[in-house]
Image: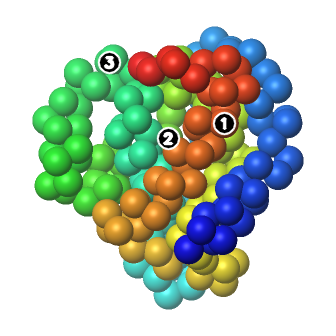
Amino acid sequence: MKFKKLILTFLLTISLSNLFSQKLIELDEDKVFDKAEYLIETMLYDGLSQDQAYVHIGLFFAWIINNSLTSEQFNSENDEDINSHKNREISPCQIFKNLDGELLGKQFNKLGYNFISTYYDKYYLSDYQIGLKLNDNDLYIAKDSWENYDLLKKVLDIRLEKWKSQLGLEKFHP
């Protein structure tokens, strides 16, 4: 078990210099990071439910919520859903589904926006595969479950802490 953890930590530290070599940037509320609708046709073509288009992004967004990386406006507009989410009364991806499957700049606070800006496009899908032990052929079959969330959380927590450390933000908690 320790060997697996060591390998995971090693894989997560490879090629991170570009990820961590920037200063914080200003938030662009209009930025679109990802949308489930980009994948719905692919899901249907592959014989999967269109709900599968929400899972990989939704699990990431669930982690964002649980790490307080969302904006004050988002939090106030979604207070009840966030409480249900944090109490695991709803599935990890439910809030993301309620938002029409859109990952937008305005949903994040400055720390969250900066993390996703440097991380999501370059590293997230490979970390998703590592965390959930998926290969390229089964990338979109993972279920919207708290069990999968907990597996992915381990990888994302390491990424966030390394990123904060490189920026000198180790003690910063939103």
Q: Residue furthest top?
A: 26
Mark 2 and mark 3 lie on one chain; the one further toward the N terminus is 3
Q: Is residue 55 visible?
A: no
Q: Is residue 27 left or right of residue 58?
A: right
The percent position of residue 162, horizontal first and vertical second, equals 66, 36
Residue 162 circle label: 1
147 over 74 or under it: above or below: below
Count neighbours of disc 1 (C-alpha within 10 A) and say few if under 14, some if 14 to 19, many if 20 or more. Answer: some
The kind of residue tagged 2 is: Leu
Amino acid tagged 1: Lys
Q: Is residue 50 above or below residue 76?
A: below
Which quadrant of the view contains residue 114?
top right
| Residue carrying label 3 | 73
Looking at the rendered image, the disc whose residue lies closer to the viewer, 1 or 3, is 1
Q: Mark 1 to mark 3: distance in Å?
A: 27 Å
**Circle count:** 3
Residue situated in front as seen by the camera: 128 or 139: 128
Q: Amino acid at mark 3?
A: Gln
Who's the residue at 75% across and 59% down the image? 11
Which residue is disc 2 drawn over?
Answer: 103
Quarter holding the N terminus is bottom right
Query: Residue 89 occupies which quadrant of the picture?
Result: bottom left
Of the numbered discs 1 and 3, the one sitting upstream in the chain is 3
**From what the image shows, is residue 10 above or below residue 159?**
below
Q: Is residue 153 visible?
A: yes
Q: Kindly identify the residue that appears in the image at 67 percent across and 32 percent down.
A: 163
What secondary structure is marked by label 2? strand
